[in-house]
Image (cartoon, grey):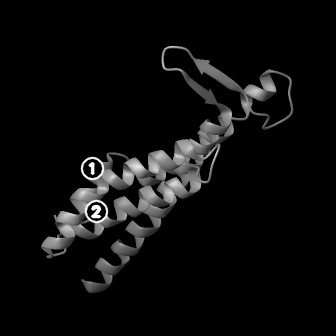
Amino acid sequence: MVRSGTLILSVAARLLLPLQLLFSLFLLLRGHDEPGGGFIAGLVASGAFALYLFAYGGRAMHAMLKVSPRDLIGFGLTLGVLSTLPALWQGEPFFTAQWWTIPLLDFKASTPLLFDVGVYLVVLGSVLTAITALVDTDREDDA
C-alpha cells in the first residue's frame, strides 16, 4: 500500500470519508425539494474517495470501493435510462415523473430519485476514473 507519509492526511482521510459520504447521501436525497441532487452529491462522494486515494493509495481505495469506477458509470447510465421506462409504461410522455409510496418506511420513491442516483453513480465513476488515471500516469512517469 502506497502511503502519503503524512500522519495528518491519513487520520483526516479516515475521519472525513464517512462524514463526506453521509453528506453526499443527504445532498442526494434532499435534491428534489431544495438545492442538491445527484451531480453535486456525486462530486462530494468522489472528493471523499479522492482524499482516501491520496492518503492511502490506489489499491486501498479500490479495496474499499470493491467495484471498478468504470462499472459505476455503466450502472449509473443504465439506472438513468431505466428511470424513463415507468412513464412510457403508463402511456405518459418521456421523463414524466412517477411516484410510489413505500408504506412501511413512509417514503416516496420516484423516477426522479432513480435518475438522480444514476447521475450520482455516473459522476462518482467518472471523477474516480479520471483521478485514478492521473495517479497511474504520474506513477508511470516516476518509474
Q: Earlier in the sequence, mark 2 or mark 1?
A: 2
> Would you name the residue on which mark 2 appears?
52
Q: Position of residue 7 (x, y in %)?
A: 13, 72
**On the image, numbered disc 1 is attached to which residue?**
64
| Residue 49 position by quadrant | bottom left
Residue at 86% of width from left, 23% of height from top? 91
Asked if 105 appears above or below 138 in the picture, the reply is above
Vertical comparison of 96 with 135: above or below: above
Picture residue at 25% right of the left edge, 63% below the top = 13
Q: Is residue 115 visible?
A: yes
Q: Is residue 7 left or right of residue 140?
A: left
Q: Amino acid at mark 2?
A: Tyr
Circle 2 or circle 1, nearest the eye:
2
Look at the image and tell me in which quarter the N terminus lies.
bottom left
Task: Check disc 1: other Cα within 10 Å, few if <14, some if 14-19, many if 20+.
Answer: few
Q: Nearer the viewer, residue 80 or 114?
A: 114
Residue 100 lies, in percent from the top left, at 65, 21
Q: Is 15 positioned to the left or the right of 120 in the image?
A: left
Q: Position of residue 105 (x, y in %)?
A: 48, 20
Q: Secondary structure at mark 2?
A: helix
Q: Find the distance from the CA under tag 2 to the CA under tag 1.
A: 10 Å
Graded by Cα atoms within 10 Å as few (under 14), some (14 to 19) or many (20 or more), the crowding at tag 2 reads: many
Task: Specify the quadrant that holds the C terminus.
Answer: bottom left
Residue 61, x across and y down, in percent: 28, 57
Amino acid marked by disc 1:
Met
Is label 2 in contact with label 1 (beta carbons under 8 Å)? Answer: yes
Most distant residue in the bottom direction: 142
- Residue at position x 25%, y 51% from top? 63
